[in-house]
Image (spheres, helix red, strand yellow):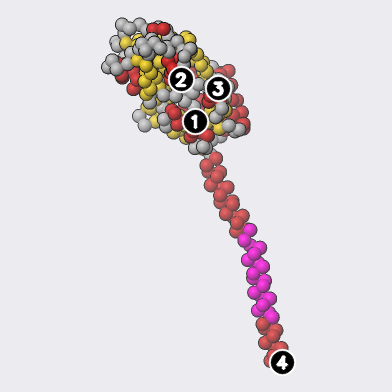
Amino acid sequence: MKKVISVVLIIAAMLSLFVGCSQNTGMEQPSSSSGGEEHAEGTNGDKDNTIKMYTNAEFAPFEYFEGEKIVGVDVDIAQEIAKDLGKELVVEHIDFKSLIPALTTGKADFVAAGMTISSDREEEVDFTIPYIESIQNIIYKKGAELKSMDDLKGKKIGVQLGTTGDLSVSEAVDSEDGKLHGSGAEVKTYANALEASQDLLTGRIDAVVIDELPAEEIVKNNEENLGTVNFGEISENYGIAVKQGNEELLKSINSTLQRLIDEGKIDEFVANHKKNV
């Protein structure tokens, strides 16, 4: 009997130990999970040390390549935004037409690309306060002296796809009440204004419509052959775009922009890059 009791006690002790181990393992699992969450937070924290800007670096002096580095007015502004947020700036170049889709799908934190604030774009993204006011320019081959929308009748007009020049000129040609509708004018779209200007130089098109400062930079490098003039019928304001609903980032960027405007820094950035391009 003593042997039987001893065996029973041993079995009971082993069962108790087994249950105890099982209970301890169950209690430690959240701790292990918590450790994983802390690691994930650490990874996210590393990501949070950067802020990503998407742009189209074919729009000097606002964004352009200097060797393999993207520089320009918008990059200088973005550096100030990153500094105020205590983050490191990452800049990536993609096609202009892909900027808003990339932003809405969360690939970038914000877009700065000499982008005009428009009602159509405001349906997809939120814009900051305006930081640059611009008007459109016509680039023409010397001797043509194109100065107004009327002068573009019957002409082949180059525009950068997705820009204000593209939207405005295309509307003037396509809409029944547009100034160029029925005039025989044609619109040809390009990835950037430089490509359009090359076709202008070779006679494939008659004019390029693009924002004022990029137009001036293109003509500066081709003064013997090209001229440009303000095309005051179309004016615009540039803004920085963030994903809709990202109010915290929008507020931070607006604060930085207002500071830079008040300090005259944006005009300074423009002057510096106009000299460098």
For the residue marked with disc 1, what is the amino acid?
Ile
Q: Is residue 68 above or below residue 149?
A: below
- The magenta segment is 12-30
Q: Main secondary structure of the magenta part?
A: helix
Looking at the image, tell me whether mark 3 or mark 2 is earlier in sequence order.
3
Q: CA distance from mark 4 to mark 3?
A: 92 Å
For the residue marked with disc 2, what is the amino acid?
Leu
In reply to whether residue 260 is colored magenta, the answer given is no
Q: CA distance from mark 4 to mark 1?
A: 83 Å
The kind of secondary structure element at disc 3 is: helix
Q: Quadrant of residue 162?
A: top left
The kind of secondary structure element at disc 1 is: helix
Question: Which numbered disc, 4 or 2, marks the residue closer to the eye?
Answer: 2
How many C-alpha atoms fall within 10 Å of the one at disc 3: few (<14), some, or many (≥20)?
few
Q: Quadrant of residue 219?
A: top left
Residue that mark 1 sits on: 100
For the residue marked with disc 3, what is the amino acid?
Ser
Rendered image: mark on residue 245: none
Residue that mark 2 sits on: 167
Looking at the image, tell me whether mark 4 or mark 1 is earlier in sequence order.
4
Residue 152 location (% of width, % of height): 38, 10
Taking the image as shown, residue 127 lies to the left or right of residue 92, namely right
Taking the image as shown, residue 32 lies to the left or right of residue 198, namely right
Question: Which numbered disc, 4 or 3, marks the residue closer to the eye?
Answer: 3
Residue that mark 3 sits on: 119
In percent of the image, x 55 and y 20: which residue is there? 130
Residue 172 location (% of width, % of height): 45, 14
In percent of the image, x 69 and y 90: which residue is there? 4
